[in-house]
Amino acid sequence: MHFIGGNHIQLLRNGVEYFPALEHAIDHALHHVYLQTYIYEADAIGIKIGDAMKRAASRGVSIYLLIDGFGSKTLPPAYIESLRIAGVNVLIYRQKISPWTFKKNRLRRLHQKVAVIDDLVSFVGGINIIDDNNVPNQIAPRVDYAVRVQGPLLIEISNSVKKLWQRLAWMHFHIKPTFKGPIRVPVHYAKDSVKAAFVTRDNILHRRDIEAAYLKAIHNAKHEIIIANAYFIPGRRFRKALISAADRGVKVKLLLQGRKEYFLMFATHAFYNVFLKNGIAIYEYRKSFMHSKVAVIDQEWATVGSSNIDPFSLFLAREANIFVKDKHFAKTLHQDIATTIHDGAYQISVKNWNKGNSVKRFLSWVAYGLVRIFLGVIGYADQH
């Protein structure tokens, strides 16, 4: 991983800021649009972004939409066909799915959320193409983040998404050629420029890159670590790194999902006791569903992306994160996480956790045991 300067990076909070920016960029595209997402729903937001892609295709822009076969399994085939008829190139990543298989190939999903428009602007983060209000029980909108990237880092992001599309197009015998237009050189921002790195996780050359970037930053932390992560089941090395940081006086804060969407999420609770006893503060966000995958360290280093801190993201899925070294950006993200904690989170104390959560503690070890069994089946048990 290497940081590249001269970038302009804007933090986008939730779909309310992300989707208008994405739609605007697509509407102003001149040459090509690449969009990769895990979930694509044909709700109000999905239709709006789809219509923007159709408009762009009608004026001659090359559109490449890559969706995951499992994450987007409810997307109606008729809607996909409507996109293709309008000129949008659509590929489905690992379309064959089964809830009962433990085959690695079926479990390796496209979880990254990346868009590149004309090699001049990109979006990277954790926000799927789904309405913020498309949540169970119609509670408050989900919490999530993305970044809008302009500058030299676009070269790496663009190359990454294009290579993945070309590889999958070849595998799917997709004979329509990909965009071959002029390569546009991103603008180098001299004023208020930001150093940033684009880091991906795949199952070929970049198996541990995102985890390694986190661990390096945690090991170098001097004052504070704040992690907001929806699916938090850290491996042994990650847990030791956080505890070691806390032992040397670093304030470690975890903002985790308080509403459990899946039973295996209870595995997160298995680590509460050891974290709390080592001085790590834990907050559960309960106001709505928190989908965030962000972190800030010493208010100088920050990351926004698609990678959870769990076995699925760190060992199996394709993920993409932006890592930033910039005090202003880190401070902005830090303040937003602090606001989320203040407005909708509940702090877990050692006393209350040990006293009144016997059922949760029991379920946590059952869930963690299932996670361990799962990891053993796929060959990663030694990592936890």
Image: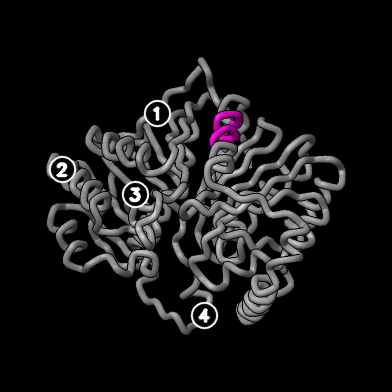
Q: What element carries label 3?
A: strand
Structural distance between the alpha carbons of marks 1 and 4: 42 Å
Q: Measured along the vertical axis of the image, is residue 351 above or below residue 17?
A: below
Res. 103 mark: 4
Question: Dot 2: few (<14), some (14–19), or many (≥20) neighbours within 10 Å?
Answer: some
- Residue drawn at (66%, 50%) of the image: 347
Q: Is mark 2 on a helix, strand or loop?
A: helix
Mark 1 belongs to which amino acid?
A: Val
Are the residues tagged 2 and 1 within 8 Å (C-beta)?
Answer: no
Q: Where does residue 341 sit, x and y in percent of width and height?
A: 58, 43
**Between disc 2 and disc 3, whose residue precedes?**
3
Looking at the rendered image, the disc whose residue lies closer to the viewer, 1 or 4, is: 4
Would residue 147 appear left or right of 354 to someone viewing this image? left
Would residue 278 appear left or right of 170 to someone viewing this image? right
Viewer can see residue 164: yes
Q: Where does residue 366 sit, x and y in percent of width and height?
A: 65, 79
Quadrant of residue 231 within the rendered picture: bottom right
Q: What residue does disc 2 label?
A: 55
**Between disc 1 and disc 3, whose residue precedes?**
3
Would residue 181 appear left or right of 36 to someone viewing this image? left
Q: What residue does disc 1 label?
A: 185
Are the residues tagged 4 and 2 within 8 Å (C-beta)?
Answer: no
Of 272 and 43, which appears nearest the observer? 272
Res. 35 mark: 3
Q: Measured along the vertical axis of the image, is residue 48 above or below residue 122?
A: below
Mark 4 belongs to which amino acid?
A: Lys
**Between disc 2 and disc 1, whose residue precedes?**
2
Residue furthest right as drawn: 248
Looking at the rendered image, the disc whose residue lies closer to the viewer, 1 or 3, is: 3
Q: Where does residue 285 sit, x and y in percent of width and height?
A: 55, 52
